[in-house]
Amino acid sequence: MSVLSPSEMEAALRQIGEERYHHLHPFHQRLHSGGCTKDEVRAWALNRYCYQRIVPLKDSAILARMDSVELRRIWRQRIVDHDGEIDDHPEGGLRRWLALTDGLGLKRDYVTSMRGALPAVRFACDAYLGFVAQKSLLEAIASSLTEMFSPMIISQRVSGMLKHYDFVSEDTLRYFGYRLDQAPRDADFALNYVKEHATTPETQEAALNALRFKCGMLWAQLDAIEHVYVNGNPCPGAWAPGTALEEMAA
């Protein structure tokens, strides 16, 4: 592999998203087109909480490895975005995700306990935390570049879900509106970092593989959800439709 120019490196990263990002997964395509049942949407939101929960944890792990004060000052904003500030002023992304599960009628303490989450989803999230802790800082930052592609899927998700599902609203989907501004900001910074620091065939391939890993991790979660809740393959201990619902939404 020869050294790619910065523009070629960016093109290679974006090609990975075009081929591997989870907007292509059949479950997401059904979700956005109105093809999911309410319980399938519940299963997705409940399991996706496992990923939302680890976002500030992985960003904390990345921040802890940064020697540069300037880098840390920039990266720590990601943690605030997801955790919020004291007393939720402003509200963070994690709380906004819980607004979605609340709106779907799932009991909040059940969601946050993750007792009903699929083992494969939890394993995928743990694998991502391990990746950012064990790989190089460059690879950890490169793995976050799925944010380059998230505005596309968010736009499809919000418009599609509002059109097709009467059990969601702009308020319960407010997590995604904030990410339309946050994700491009974060992706621009990470992309510039990767282009600046991936300057050899080895480091460029490592960065590309990191993004491939992250895309695979996101895809694996949807595989698990589809396997159990769409294809009807039981998973002992996993959330079952009709359980852990608030009385008013049951």
Image (tube, helix red, strand yellow):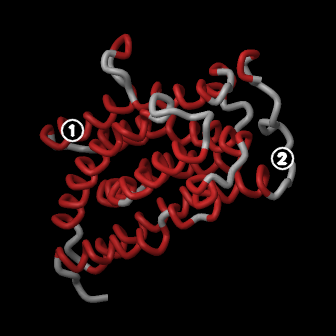
Q: Amino acid at mark 2?
A: Cys
- The front one of 206 and 103 is 103
Foreground of the two, 202 or 50: 50
Horizontally, residue 127 falls left or right of residue 189, namely right
Residue 4 image offset from top left, x and y in percent = 22, 82
User: SS at mark 2?
Assistant: loop
- Residue extending farthest to the left is 70
Q: Residue furthest bottom?
A: 2
Where is the C terminus found, in terms of image quarters? top right
Q: Are marks 1 and 2 in contact (CB under 8 Å)?
A: no
Residue 10: quarter of image: bottom left
The answer to which of marks 1 and 2 sits earlier in the sequence is 1
Residue 143 seen from this side: no
Residue denoted by label 1: 72
Q: Is residue 77 above or below residue 6?
A: above
* Identity of the residue drawn at 20% across and 43% down: 67
**Residue annotated with mark 2:** 235
Q: Measuring 57% from the left and 34% from the top, which residue is drawn there?
A: 168
Residue occupying image coordinates x 37% and y 22% = 91
Numbered tag placed on residue 215 in the rendering: none
**Which secondary structure lies at badge 1?**
helix
